[in-house]
Image (cartoon, coloured by chain):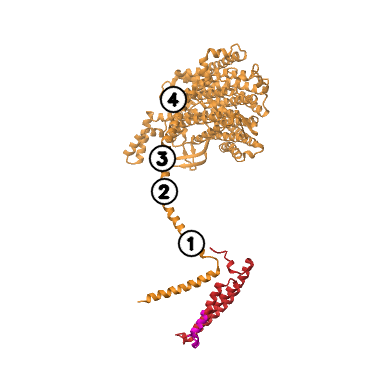
Amino acid sequence: MELATLLPLLLLLAWLLPLASFTVIVFAGPRLGRAGHKAGYIATGAIGTSLVLSLIALGSWLWHHPIVSTHHDEAAVHGEADRHGETGNHEEHETPEAHGEHASPVHFTDDWYTLAEFGSLKLTIGYYIDALTLGMFVMVSLIATCIHVYSFGYMHEELEDVTDPLASTSSGKPLVRAGRFHRFYQYLSLFCFSMLGLVVAGNIAMVFVFWELVGICSYLLIGFYIERKSASNAANKAFIVNRVGDFGMIIGLMVLFGGLGTFAFGDIEDANGTVHPGIFSQVRPDENGRELTVPDGLVRMAAASQMDSIYESMPSAEEAEIQIAQRITELRKHNTGYWLLILAGLGIFCGCVGKSAQFPLHVWLPDAMEGPTPVSALIHAATMVAAGVYLVGRFYPVFAPEVLLVIAYVGCATLFMAATIAITATDIKRVLAYSTVSQLGYMMFSLGVGGWAAGLFHLFTHAFFKSLLFLCSGSVIHACHTNEMPEMGGLRKKMPWTAWTMLAGCLAISGAGIPLLYGLSGFHSKDSILAQAFSFGQRSPSQAWLFWVAAAGAAITAFYMFRLWFMTFAGKPRNQRVYDHAHESPASMYVPLVILAFFAVTAGWPVPGLNLPGLLEQARPVGTAEGFPGSVEIASLVVPAEHLSHLDAVHRPVSMIASGAAVTGFLIAVLFYLVRVFNPETVRRALWPVHAFLIHKWFFDELYDLVFVKPTLLLAQVAGALDRLVIDRLADGSARFCVAVARIDDLIDRLVVDRIVNGLGRLTYGFGQRLRPLQSGLLRQYVVMIAVSTVALFLLIFFYRNMTLLP
Amino acid sequence: MFILGQPVSLSHYLVVGAILFVCGIVCMATKRNAIGVLMGVELVLNGAAVNFVAFSCPFLRADSHLALGLDGHLITLFIIVLAAAEAAVALAIALCYYNTHATIDVDEGDELKG
């Protein structure tokens, strides 16, 4: 079968299977076996089949488009880069080889179904499939499958009635509620469906729909233990913070749609054979060598009043159009409309900031660990937060260098801030949550400095080792029934599978490896990020400090990860009761750990013909292969091409620095928590202001509480008072007036109308009473009466006649 | 001018009818026995019938050459038939009355008084 028909079919199936499972569980839920435990099999089967289908899709893709060896690329780049070095900043414009690489990446895009059409606004369910989509599909479904299997063990308590000690009823006793095993799997299925839909989406409107679906799924799952106040608060927080980001995203969408008149990513050919250009080809048109160009629509939008006056001054519409086309070319030279492009990019990025928990909207992610641990793993690795990074990657051609700089700053701030907070956290999941925020910062940072493939590469490797780490922590929590690391210690003897797989995860996230050769997955991805940052710093010297922040972040990462591992698994048990209670988790829990550990170790390996960077390189967005040569607004800003970071001159020193940073962090952790040369307690006391700053998470929650939550509550109170004092009183007053009028009406009724009617009735009744004795029931009396009255009647008539006859 | 000294004419019939009628009324008003009351009713009916027959005399009619002059007779026949039917129904009532009250004293049946 043709690849162009096979891939959409496979991915459509893989995408809709979790929806089918969701639908079945929604309607049949509790009836699926005892306490709905078969819902787990249905959901796992669905996502497992999705995984198989995604793997088939990826396999057939690789069959048709084998990954070219990266070494060959590097060789080709060497010579080119030398030339670049000589010609300075404007090199990309004229190099013929450079134009050769500008070809659009192989992709398939079309619409499956048209939802609605309002004039030029067309909402469709479509797909955009390239190597990135396929990679995401495999990654998401693989991790989701592992988490589904793992949850069989982790959520087994939900099969019976659950006594929740953290949620108390009004009487003060712990809450007892029915188990919700099937509902958990129902949400997981919806979550997978939403994420896969987001990845496969062929237009930004559809992305937005699934974006929100992912948001609502995370809301439902974070608030899974809804009876706990903290869980419902965390769910609300996640949802509301994401709304802030989505507001920006809607602005970006509106700018893009208003200017370009389309939502689609790629060019879509309709039934008549007309090709409707998508966002990418409008922003980076072929005729301009796929350089970032302000599209006509945005120029028109920016200079709307000029366009209107041309229309008015010209006799016919055709002539006006010609004039306008000329004016647009003129205006474009002055970069009219460029700010709209920046606005669109910042808007889209704003949504990604919310979803991917970037500074300053990162506050929801650490709280999101209120959900069950498998959910945290899913949110932190494969679905929710990956969506933001994925969208930045997908929208890469639209971002102007200025937007990229903002992305880099935000990412850099996030990675450093979150890493420092993770140092002091004692809750095992909180450490991992801040680590996620920090790693997401790395991804955004990488995308911002031009490392498209490096950033997404890190998204993939991070997905594997972070889901592994979270599932391991879940296993620990399952065994110890506490999240606090100071209660743990020495657990490696009790739970070897968990301990050693988690060690693999820690090594992977710290970027352990032999410099310049092989390493764990995190080693490769983090190296490429740092190399790109270094290369960026070389081209834009004013931004060189970003690299050093990122390198420092790498050291901190290694420190807090090994702090976590040492505190949990090494040393002597700190709490004997917890230690005695601990046990290794069931096989359904540690088998996924082993699978994920395997990928956490190997996902980054540069195996010829089958490696992630090569796969991602196939999907490199149009026109970004040569970087962003120059910025319009900031003269010194140059975002270099990514292949330049593969040069030995860049890669070697960076790799040494990165490994040095990781080893430093590791050694400090050893000194503090394994060998105990330093006592963490004394350091904490010596540096108490820093410690207080970090333990309060840079006071972000307090700040937001003061700046946003408190004023909002105050405003609500004012509005409430206004309601009660003014509006309620008005309403109450009018009601009281009505009641008074009704009272008067009632009096009239009772005193006048009723009395007339009652009087008549009483009159009739009395008359009847008087006549009663007449009917005595004595027949003879009746006869006499009849006779007498007949006679009397005759007599009357007789006398009457006689009287009238009298003169 | 004593009526018995006159030749028999309409007046005599009317007197007989009136006497019958009054006897009937008095009988109805005085008898407590249901059968007695019934007999009074018969007397009243017959008094009326005598009047009808008396007034049907052809000489009393202005249009005697046009009519057969049998109207009164026919109505009287109806009265006789009706009286027979009425007597049958009334006797049945009397029997039922006896069944329920163990007497045929009409003064006892005053349950429907107002």
- Residue A213 vs A787, above or below: the answer is above
* Callout 3 crowding tier (Cα within 10 Å): few <14, some 14–19, many ≥20: few
Q: Are marks 3 and 1 on the same chain?
A: yes
> Circle 2 sits in a helix, a strand or a loop, which is it?
helix
Whether the residues at callouts 4 and 3 have beta carbons within 8 Å, the answer is no
- Horizontal side, residue A101 vs residue A172: left or right: left
Which numbered mark, 2 or 3, is in the foreground of this view?
A: 2
> Circle 1 sits in a helix, a strand or a loop, which is it?
helix
Which chain, by letter, is red? B
Q: Which residues are magenta?
A: B2-18
Q: Chain of mark 4?
A: A
Identify the mark at residue A402; answer none if there is no mark: 4
- Tag 3: amino acid: Gly
Q: CA distance from mark 1 to mark 2?
A: 36 Å
Mark 1, residue position: A770
Mark 3, residue position: A733
Q: Are marks 2 and 3 on the same chain?
A: yes
Which secondary structure class fits the magenta region best? helix
> Circle 4 sits in a helix, a strand or a loop, which is it?
helix
Mark 2, residue position: A745
Whether the residues at callouts 1 and 2 have beta carbons within 8 Å, the answer is no
- Tag 2: amino acid: Asp
